[in-house]
Image (cartoon, coloured by chain):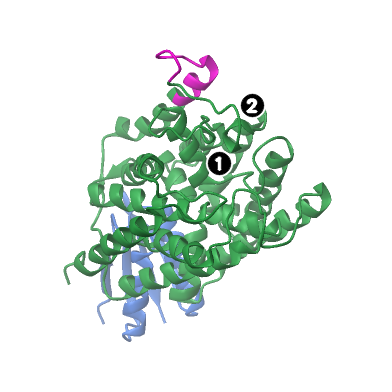
C-alpha cells in the first residue's frame, strides 16, 4: 500500500498539522509528511503521538520526511 | 539531538520565566501591568521614531530589540536560522496594521492581557474572551482551507535585515540622536513612555526571552488556536505557566490590585475591550502568530513575520494619528470605526485566500 504524501514545505504553522490531521481523520493509515523546518516537524510528531500512531523521521535533501503509521 | 525546550516541561519553564521577568521589569520601572507588552512596546517605538505624536508613549523599548536579537542568536546556535519569505507579504503587512489597531483599542497584546489579569485587572477577562473568539473565527477559516500560500527560501543575508534594523534602533537609543529641534527622536517626559527599567536590564531580559521563546515556540495565539483546533494543550501549558508565575510574583512584589475601575493603562469599556481583542486575535490567527511570536520568527529569518511586525509598528502610528487608540477614559472617537474596517479586511482575507486543492 502506498503512503499518502503531504507536501507541507513552506507552509506556516499550523497548516502542516491541519493537513496531516485531515489525512489521518480521512482514514489514511500510512502517510509521509514533507516539511522544511524543525517547528513543523515537532508539531507533526506531537500530532502523531496524540493519535497514538508510530512516527519516524528521515532527512530528504534539505527537507525532513516524517513517516506516520497506524 | 533533541530540544529540551520543545517538551511539555520546557514550554512551562519558558512561560514561568517570562512571567517572572515581566513582573520584575515592572518592579524595576516598566509601566504597570506592562512589564512586557509587545503591542505597547512597538507602539512606543513608533512614537520615539515620530510615526505618531502621542507624547506619553514614546520610547525605544529595548525589550523588543532583545526579542529579535535573542531569537536570532538562538536560531543561529541551533542551526534553525533559515531565511524564508514571499507568502503574501502585503496581506501580512495589513494584518499587522489591523492587529495593532485592535490591540490598542483594548490596550495590550495577548501577553499584556495575561499580565493585566495577573495584576488583578479584571477588564483583561473581556479582552481574553475577545481574543479567544477572534482566534476561533480564524480556526474556522483554517479548517476550511485558508492559506496565505507557501514561503520560499530566501538568500542567506536577507534574514539578517530585521535583526540589523533592531540593532540600529538600539544605537539610536544609546546615542539619543536629535534629528531636528524638538525631535525626533522623541522620548516621553511623562506617562507610560517615561516609565522604564534600566536599559541593560530590559535588553538582557529581552534577549533571554527571545532566545528561550525561539527554542520553545512560545505563542499565546497558538496556545488558544491549538486548543480550539486540535485539543492540543502543549502551548497552553506555557501560557498557564506565565499567568501563574506573574500572579505569584505580583503578590510577592505588592503589584496585585484587583478590580475593574481605575486599573493602570486600561479602560472599562467592555464591548470595545472584547471587539478590539477579537480583531487582534483574528489577525494573529490569519498571520500565524501572536506579536511576540512574529518577532521571534523574524529573528530566525522569517521575512514575512518581519513584514507583519513592521505592519504593527506602522499600525501604531495609524492608530494614534487617527484617534483610534483607547485611553484610560475609554474607546477613542475612531476606535470602533477602525475595528470595523479591520474586521471587514480580515474577513475578506479569510474568505478569499484559499489553498489550491
Q: Secondary structure at mark 1?
A: helix
Horizontal and vertical percent for residue B70?
53, 36
Most distant residue in the bottom direction: A27
In this rendering, the answer to whether B207 lies above or below A54 is above
Most distant residue in the left direction: B356
Residue B69 relative to residue A36: left or right: right
Disc on res. B200: 2
Horizontal and vertical percent for residue B199?
62, 26
Horizontal and vertical percent for residue B3?
56, 52
The reply to the same-chain question for discs 1 and 2 is yes
The chain letter of the blue chain reads A
Horizontal and vertical percent for residue B325?
44, 48
Could you tell me which quadrant the C terminus of chain B lies in? Answer: bottom left
In this rendering, the answer to whether B95 lies above or below B234 is above
Residue A17 is covered by the magenta coloring: no
Query: Mark 1 and mark 2: span between their CA atoms?
Result: 16 Å
Residue found 53% across the figure and 30% down from its top: B59
Label 1 vs label 2, nearer the camera: 2
The chain letter of the green chain reads B
Q: State the extent of the magenta-drawn residues as a range.
A: B169-183
Image quadrant where residue B159 sits? top left
Residue found 64% across the figure and 41% down from its top: B31
Q: Which chain letter goes with mark 1?
A: B
Residue B172 is covered by the magenta coloring: yes
Q: Secondary structure at mark 2?
A: helix
Reading the image, the residue beneath label 1 is B211
Asked whether B18 or A40 is in front, the reply is B18
Asked whether A52 or B66 is in front, the reply is B66
Disc on res. A56: none
Image quadrant where residue A26 sits? bottom left
State which tag comes first along the sequence, 1 or 2: 2
Q: Which chain letter goes with mark 2?
A: B
Amino acid at each position: 500500500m502506498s503512503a499518502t504524501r503531504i507536501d507541507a514545505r513552506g507552509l506556516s504553522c499550523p497548516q502542516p498539522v491541519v493537513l496531516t490531521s485531515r489525512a489521518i481523520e480521512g482514514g489514511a493509515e500510512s502517510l509521509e509528511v514533507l516539511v522544511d523546518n524543525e517547528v513543523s516537524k515537532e508539531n507533526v510528531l506531537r500530532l502523531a503521538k496524540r493519535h497514538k500512531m508510530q512516527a519516524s523521521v528521515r532527512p530528504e535533501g534539505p527537507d525532513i520526511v516524517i513517516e506516520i503509521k497506524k | 539531538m533533541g530540544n529540551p525546550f520543545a517538551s511539555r516541561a520546557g514550554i512551562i519553564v519558558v512561560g514561568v520565566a517570562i512571567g517572572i521577568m515581566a513582573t520584575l521589569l515592572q518592579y524595576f520601572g516598566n509601566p504597570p501591568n506592562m512589564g512586557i507588552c509587545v503591542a505597547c512596546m512597538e507602539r512606543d517605538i513608533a512614537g520615539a521614531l515620530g510615526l505618531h505624536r502621542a507624547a506619553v508613549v514614546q520610547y525605544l523599548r529595548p525589550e523588543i530589540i532583545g526579542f529579535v536579537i535573542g531569537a536570532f542568536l538562538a536560531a543561529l546556535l541551533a542551526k534553525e536560522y533559515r531565511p524564508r519569505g514571499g507568502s503574501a507579504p502585503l496581506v501580512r503587512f495589513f494584518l499587522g496594521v489591523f492587529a495593532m489597531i485592535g490591540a490598542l483599542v483594548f490596550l495590550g497584546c495577548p501577553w499584556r492581557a495575561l499580565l493585566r489579569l495577573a495584576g488583578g485587572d479584571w477588564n483583561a477577562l473581556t479582552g481574553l474572551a475577545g481574543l479567544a473568539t477572534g482566534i476561533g473565527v480564524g480556526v474556522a477559516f483554517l479548517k476550511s482551507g485558508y492559506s496565505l500560500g507557501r514561503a520560499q527560501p530566501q538568500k542567506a543575508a536577507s534574514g539578517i535585515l530585521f535583526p540589523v534594523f533592531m540593532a540600529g534602533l538600539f544605537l539610536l537609543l544609546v546615542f539619543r540622536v536629535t534629528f531636528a529641534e524638538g525631535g525626533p527622536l522623541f522620548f516621553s517626559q511623562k506617562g507610560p513612555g517615561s516609565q522604564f527599567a534600566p536599559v541593560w536590564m530590559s535588553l538582557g531580559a529581552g534577549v533571554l526571552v527571545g532566545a528561550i521563546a525561539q527554542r520553545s515556540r512560545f505563542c499565546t495565539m497558538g496556545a488558544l488556536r491549538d486548543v480550539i483546533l486540535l485539543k492540543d494543550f502543549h502551548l497552553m501549558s506555557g501560557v498557564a505557566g506565565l499567568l501563574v508565575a506573574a500572579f505569584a510574583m505580583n503578590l510577592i512584589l505588592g503589584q496585585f490590585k484587583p478590580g475593574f475601575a481605575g486599573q493602570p493603562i486600561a479602560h472599562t469599556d467592555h464591548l470595545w475591550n472584547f471587539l478590539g481583542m477579537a480583531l487582534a486575535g483574528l489577525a494573529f490567527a490569519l498571520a500565524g502568530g501572536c506579536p511576540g511570536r512574529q518577532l521571534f520568527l523574524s529573528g530566525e529569518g522569517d521575512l514575512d513575520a518581519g513584514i507583519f511586525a513592521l505592519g504593527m509598528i506602522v499600525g501604531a502610528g495609524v492608530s494614534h494619528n487617527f484617534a483610534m487608540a483607547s485611553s484610560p477614559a475609554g474607546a477613542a472617537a475612531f476606535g470602533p470605526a477602525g475595528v470595523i474596517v479591520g474586521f471587514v479586511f480580515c474577513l475578506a482575507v479569510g474568505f478569499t485566500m484559499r489553498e489550491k486543492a
